């Protein structure tokens, strides 16, 4: 009994299903046709029906003004005001149609329109598979729904899933945006567009580009991959992936992020970027690097986080903020600090928290600094509190100047003059022909003025209450060689490779395979032995070096106001 009842139980559990019309089900002529005429058409037996003609096959109805019903095959050819209705949901109209009842395929030509509860499709010709509920067109189509219009060269529409697929010159238009590409899918229920290939979205709030992704036409949220970009009047933001919410005007880019400020051609690259358009703010982090090119001189700026804030004024490029482990690289200038502000309108760079700058062989430190640019070249450096300049001469001696504040002036990015303002101290070595140290100059003054030529110190002028001394080499002590607060930080000087990182590093050139060298051996003549190389002569013994003459003692300069006769180097 159990074996007999088990199939019955399983049969009761199965949900009831409506079996689709079987292939080959005969097309039924419905009553009401005005005239029926039998005859032969193109060598085939037909029934010609005229006036108010209607047919039925399962849940499908066909209406027309006149038709040919083939006697030897299950097919209808319909003319004038042709209309196919399936399950009271899909309606197709046209000037002429052909319906294959065995394959359940309908082809409509001439002013074709397909309608369902969500969309209206118009096209010159349409094929419709009633089994799969899919409509095809190849000669251009125009789709309208309550929110969008769409045009393409080819496409198909699944009336069951209500998903469109388009190919060739695709254009999706709404009130706020336009999507153009070559391959697109569109779900008429969720209003989500899926694209595969180069796609552009043009809107009032900016333009988007990507080569793969989705766009929700209802929420206006984009999820782009493959070379994704968003372009606004002021910025161009791109990355491997880009998510942008047009309603909130907020975007997030990830992977090879690049942000370009159009006003002054500043480019910031990193791993992650965020953009708030209403705030005019963009943030890039993940090893970010900024590049600014002006007059063939490139400034690179790296930090843990870079932020760009645009101003509302039309000609104001805004401000760049950099914080945590900031590194600078530009031609003859390198530097580092903890945080930095770059006011691009005033061309002033503010360095905060233990800044260090290197200009050729000169090192500058202070509690905070300013770099003032003029025509995109360094014009001034201002050092505030605990200012210190250290330079190394050809004999690796450390020349030093310190004071409360300093102002360094540049010409063509080369150091020209330094004003030391308050508690000025200097220590520099006097050299003879850059080959021998003749002594050490030490001076203290309220203020000083240092003048340079080709980055070499030429003169020091003591302006208030000077006190100077000269120490000959044989009287030098270790404590005399450094001013209080001296530190040589050359090991921290950032290199170009360290600042550029992976985002601006040049692509590695492929290494070519070295040509194979074929060694050729000459056969020695018969009967002759190969000569051995002659032994090298031994080097002559080195002559004993002459003892150096004792250095002459140099007295301090009588006029401490100008100590430039020895031409020291800083």
Image (cartoon, helix red, strand yellow):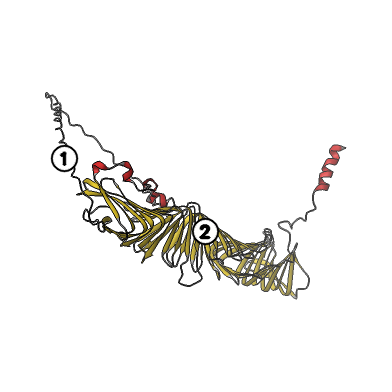
1 or 2: mark nearer the eye = 1
Most foreground residue, 110 or 51: 110
Q: CA distance from mark 1 to mark 2?
A: 65 Å
Camera-side residue of 540 and 71: 540
Query: Could you say whether the residue bearing mark 2 is in a helix, strand or loop?
Result: strand
Residue 289 x/y as whole percent: 45, 55
> Could you tell me if residue 6 is visible in this image?
yes
Please indicate whether residue 435 sits to the left or right of residue 331 in the image: left
Q: Is residue 67 left or right of residue 495?
A: right
Place residue 516 in its image quadrant: top left
Task: Please identify the quadrant where the N terminus is shown.
Answer: top right
The correct choice, above or below, for 174 with respect to 381 in the image is below
Answer above or below: position of 339 versus 68. above
| Residue to which mark 2 is pinned | 283
Q: Position of residue 431 (x, y in %)?
A: 22, 49
Choose the circle earlier in sequence order: 1 or 2.
2
Is there any visible trace of residue 570 in the rendered image? no
Element type at mark 1: loop
404 vs 89, nearest the viewer: 404
Disc 1 marks which residue? 549
Q: Residue 85 occupies which quadrant of the picture? A: bottom right
Q: Check disc 2: other Cα within 10 Å, few if <14, some if 14-19, many if 20+.
A: many
Residue in view at x 68 percent, y 72 percent:
82
Q: Is residue 239 left or right of residue 527?
A: right
User: Compared to 524, does 394 lie above or below?
Assistant: below
Residue 62 picture location, percent across and down: 71, 68
């Amino acid at each position: 009994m159990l074996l007999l009842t088990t199939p019955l139980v399983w049969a009761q559990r199965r949900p009831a299903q409506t079996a689709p019309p079987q292939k080959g089900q005969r097309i039924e002529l419905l009553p009401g046709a005005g005239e029926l005429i039998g005859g032969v058409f193109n060598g085939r037996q037909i029934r010609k029906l005229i006036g108010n003609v209607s047919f039925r096959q399962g849940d499908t109805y066909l209406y027309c003004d006149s038709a040919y019903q083939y006697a030897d095959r299950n097919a209808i050819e319909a003319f004038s005001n042709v209309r196919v209705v399936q399950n009271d949901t899909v309606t197709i109209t046209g000037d002429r149609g052909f319906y294959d009842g065995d394959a359940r395929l309908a082809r409509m030509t001439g002013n074709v329109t397909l309608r369902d509860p969500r969309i209206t499709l118009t096209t010159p010709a349409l094929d419709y598979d009633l089994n799969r509920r899919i409509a095809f067109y190849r000669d251009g189509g125009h789709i309208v729904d309550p929110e969008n219009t769409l045009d393409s060269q080819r496409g198909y529409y699944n009336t069951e899933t209500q998903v469109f697929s388009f190919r060739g010159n695709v254009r999706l238009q709404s009130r706020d945006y336009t999507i153009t590409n070559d391959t697109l899918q569109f779900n008429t229920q969720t209003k989500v567009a899926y694209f595969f290939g180069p796609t552009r979205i043009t809107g009032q709030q900016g333009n988007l580009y990507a080569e793969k992704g989705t766009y929700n036409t209802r929420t206006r949220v984009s999820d782009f991959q493959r070379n994704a970009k968003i372009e606004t009047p002021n910025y161009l933001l791109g990355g491997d992936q880009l998510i942008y919410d047009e309603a909130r005007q907020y975007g997030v880019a990830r992977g090879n992020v690049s942000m370009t400020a159009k006003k002054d051609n500043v480019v910031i690259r990193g791993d992650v970027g965020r953009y708030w358009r209403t705030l005019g703010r963009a943030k890039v982090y993940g090893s970010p690097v900024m590049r600014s090119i002006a007059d063939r001189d490139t400034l690179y700026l790296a930090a843990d986080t870079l932020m760009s804030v645009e101003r509302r004024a039309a000609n104001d490029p805004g401000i760049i903020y950099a914080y945590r482990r900031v590194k600078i690289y530009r031609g003859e200038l390198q530097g580092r600090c903890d945080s930095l502000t770059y006011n691009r309108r005033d061309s002033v760079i503010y360095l905060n928290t233990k800044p260090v700058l290197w200009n050729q062989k000169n090192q500058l430190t202070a509690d905070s600094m300013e770099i003032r640019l003029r025509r995109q070249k360094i014009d001034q450096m201002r050092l505030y509190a605990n200012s210190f300049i250290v330079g190394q001469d050809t004999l690796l001696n450390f020349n030093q100047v310190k004071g409360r504040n300093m102002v360094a002036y540049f010409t063509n990015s080369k150091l020209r003059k330094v004003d030391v303002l308050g508690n000025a101290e200097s220590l520099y070595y006097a050299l003879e022909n850059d080959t021998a140290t003749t002594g050490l100059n030490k001076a203290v003054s309220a203020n000083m003025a240092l003048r340079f030529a080709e980055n070499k110190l030429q003169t020091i002028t003591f302006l208030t209450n000077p006190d100077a001394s000269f120490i000959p080499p044989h009287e030098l002590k270790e404590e005399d060689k450094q001013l209080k607060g001296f530190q040589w930080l050359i090991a921290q000087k950032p290199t170009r490779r360290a600042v550029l990182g992976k985002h601006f590093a040049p692509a590695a050139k492929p290494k070519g395979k070295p040509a194979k060298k074929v060694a050729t051996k000459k056969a020695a003549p018969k009967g002759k032995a190969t000569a051995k190389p002659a032994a090298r002569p031994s080097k002559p013994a080195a002559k004993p070096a002459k003892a150096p003459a004792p250095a002459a003692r140099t007295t301090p300069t009588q006029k401490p106001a100008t100590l430039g006769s020895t031409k020291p180097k800083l």
